Amino acid sequence: MASKRIYNVAIVGYGYWGPNLMRNFMHSVNFTVAYLVDSAPAALNSFQVSYPNVAITTSIDVVLEDDGVDAVVIASPPKSHYNLAKQAVLKGKHVFVEKPFTTSFEEASEIVELADKHALKVFVDYTFLFHGAIGTIRQIIQDKLKFGELLYIDSVRINLGIFQSDVNVVWDLACHDIAIFNYLLDDLPLAVQAVGIDGLGNGNENISYIHLKYKNKFAQINCSWSSPVKIRRMLIGGNRQAILYNDIEPTDKIKVYNKGVVFDTEDKRNEILQDYRTGEVFIPKYDTTEALKNVVCGFYDALTDAGESRGDGQAALLTTFILEMIQKSIILGGKELEIDWRQVGPSLYSYITSKGMLNQQ
Ligand SMILES: NC(=O)c1ccc[n+]([C@@H]2O[C@H](COP(=O)([O-])OP(=O)(O)OC[C@H]3O[C@@H](n4cnc5c(N)ncnc54)[C@H](O)[C@@H]3O)[C@@H](O)[C@H]2O)c1
């Protein structure tokens, strides 16, 4: 039996999120962490005590020149992703990039094109796509007989967060919602409209309200770094059931309500009658494996062509394009912007059509 290939990776960026990636890559039987790169020497000092076998360096150049490194895992601030990913791909390395992929669609497209040209993989970590709760929600929604047609999604992702210096709250937080919507709905918005407040006046909005219009449904997002309370709540309504996903709950994050409003249009008096169905509430089980562990497995599946597509570069390009449209709408003072998906270019458009993403009712 052929032995399983183990990939050597270098992790770049060891601030808040890098240690979580390090722990999960270290524990994976599919990967060896060969290097940790951080431009700040202080970040590296704390690390070496715990993992003496990993080489540390303040410059990615050493990693790029090492033919033994198969992939570069990028967990530095968003504005640095493009340059780091491009350099890595040009040196023949696969790339794993933290969300948000890049800070523009143009940059993201260039990375995906370059990687394709060199037969390399681009994987983007939208961690929630690998969370057991999201997987279970997707299954519930797909059971149309029980759930009915999906009508709306309402997401609130607010807390007292760190004001990022290189992206606004849309690219930092709402990017999760957009990636989740694309994955849950297998559908894409046909128009976006958004407003934002730039509290510090540095060009990076810290509060935003976003509205997405699909063919037959709506979604909206409120994201903020300025809320005194932390809320991570998504309400997903179908015409038979509704799902409440509360990510703050330590357990039982999903509740399915067999409750709703029924409109009786068959009434003899020719009036539309409204009736409330107050059915039971169901708490489904879901896989509680740490999402980041699943992400690391997903990256391995992508590298070995095992059919994994949740983290692929094309899916992340769609999210990036929607984020850019939202940003444009904010700049235009909340103007509704229609999206013609042919604008994304023939290769990405053919990805969209191959997935049937614009065929949803
Ligand atoms: N998937 C998730 O849920 C999740 C959660 C938090 C953060 N993130 C993402 O992870 C990334 C890092 O976020 P963070 O909160 O850890 O940031 P951070 O500022 O805490 O840490 C970034 C680290 O990268 C280093 N760095 C900066 N530029 C570098 C470069 N060019 N080369 C090497 N090192 C460099 C910094 O010195 C710092 O140690 C961001 O893209 C962020 O959006 C993802």
Image (tube, rainbow, N blue to C red):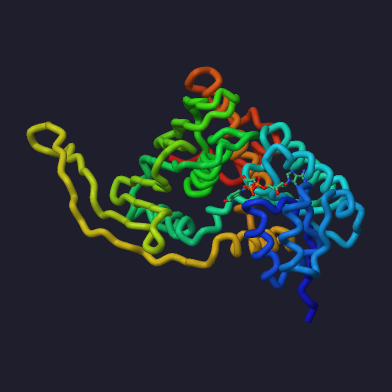
Q: Position of residue 224 (x, y in %)?
A: 47, 37
Q: Residue furthest left?
A: 269
Q: Quadrant of the C terminus?
A: top left
Q: Quadrant of residue 139?
A: bottom left
Q: Is residue 184 above or below residue 108?
A: below
Taking the image as shown, residue 305 lies to the left or right of residue 174, namely right
Q: Residue furthest bottom?
A: 1
Taking the image as shown, residue 8 lies to the left or right of residue 305, namely right
Q: Is residue 214 above or below residue 275?
A: above
Q: Position of residue 96 (x, y in %)?
A: 71, 52
Can residue 234 be seen here? The reply is yes
Q: Quadrant of the N terminus?
A: bottom right
Q: Residue at x 53, y 45 (%)?
A: 176
Q: Position of residue 168 (x, y in %)?
A: 57, 33
Taking the image as shown, residue 267 lies to the left or right of residue 87, namely left
Q: Is residue 5 above or below residue 281?
A: below
Q: Nearer the viewer, residue 134 or 185?
A: 134
Q: Quadrant of residue 6?
A: bottom right
Q: Residue at x 60, y 30 (%)?
A: 324
Q: Nearer the viewer, residue 234 or 261?
A: 234
Q: Nearer the viewer, residue 269 or 139?
A: 139
Q: Residue at x 62, y 34 (%)?
A: 167
Can residue 221 be seen here? The reply is no
Taking the image as shown, residue 300 lies to the left or right of residue 157, namely right
The mark total stands at 0
Q: Residue at x 69, y 51 (%)?
A: 123
Q: Position of residue 81 (x, y in %)?
A: 73, 42
